[in-house]
Amino acid sequence: MSKPVIGISAVNVFNELYYLQRVTYPQTVENCGGIPVLLPCLPGTENAAELISHLDGLMLPGGADVDPSLYGEERTPQCGQSLLADDRYDFALIGEAMRQKKPVLAICRGMQAVNISCGGTVYQDISAQYGSDIAHSDPNFKAEIFHAVNTEPNSRLAKIIGTALQVNSSHHQAVKAIAPGFRAVATAPDGITEAIENDDGSVICVQWHPERMQDTPEMVKLISDFVRRCGSGG
Ligand code: MN
């Protein structure tokens, strides 16, 4: 049986001269049985439907904050830099993957992008707009920090990873209004939404970084289950 081919969105960086992505995403997909391909976020989105038709699934990695204009807000001082063209490209990929019923695994910024593209919003900065008493990122984004999450027992996510576990945390934004068709399926002790999924569980979005926790069996299961579903048509 052929292995599923999984597209991983890349970012346009260094004066828009390079399409790049961190090695952990393709490495993890390959380790869990898939064939990863990096997707350059080209300026036009007219080929998104055909591109997605060649793929078995879509992984959306972490990255920059989504441009607040895409959820109808003014940028606050705490909002990070955005790449509007990349946001639009990711939105096109998300829309097509969902329309063509290809499984999606969205990580960190990817979760925020899915939520916004489907009509939800985010806190532009957790500290400024939510005021949590637990840390969701290292101040310098260097050390890996962890916090607990509880998952919704009747979710696809809970069936894969269980109902209570520790996850890494490297984000300063978080889902605020959850997009129609999605629900919260994991929550941090402070109430921050740490995962969402759609009604049929074909789109799973996590705020943490499972690709950086591959010595944790639950996180291997999360990626492996995604790759398996990509290979079986969802
Ligand atoms: Mn967190």
Image (cartoon, grey):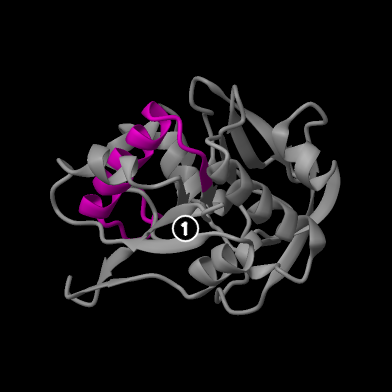
Q: Tell me, yes or no, if residue 161 can be seen here.
A: yes
Q: Nearer the viewer, residue 125 or 40?
A: 40
Percent from the top left, x then y, of residue 31? Answer: 62, 68
Q: Which residue is mark 1?
A: 61
Drawn side of residue 156 relative to residue 44, left or right: right
Picture residue at 45% right of the left edge, 54% below the top: 5
Q: Is residue 186 left or right of residue 172?
A: right
The answer to whether 137 is drawn above or below residue 112 in the figure is below
Three-letter code, disc 1 = Pro
Task: Report if residue 24 lies within the magenta region.
Answer: no
Reply above or below: 7 against 50: below
How dense is the environment of label 1, judged by Cα within 10 Å: few (below 14), some, or many (20 and up)? many
* Image height of 60 relative to 14, above or below: above
* Image spot of residue 187 (x, y percent): 73, 40
> Residue 96's x, y, as percent?
33, 34
Q: Is residue 29 left or right of residue 147?
A: left
Say what secondary structure mark 1 lies in. Answer: loop
Q: Where the C terminus falls, by quadrant?
A: top right
The residue at 34%/33% (across/down) is 95
Highlighted magenta segment, given as a residue range = 76-105
- Ligand 1 lies under 8 Å from the Cβ of mark 1: no
Where is residue 70 drawn, in percent x and y? 29, 37
Q: Is residue 225 above or below residue 198?
A: below
12 left or right of 152? left
Instruction: Name the one closer to the observer, 177 or 127.
Output: 177
Which residue occupies 51% across, 39% down? 103
Q: Does the magenta run of residues contain 79?
A: yes
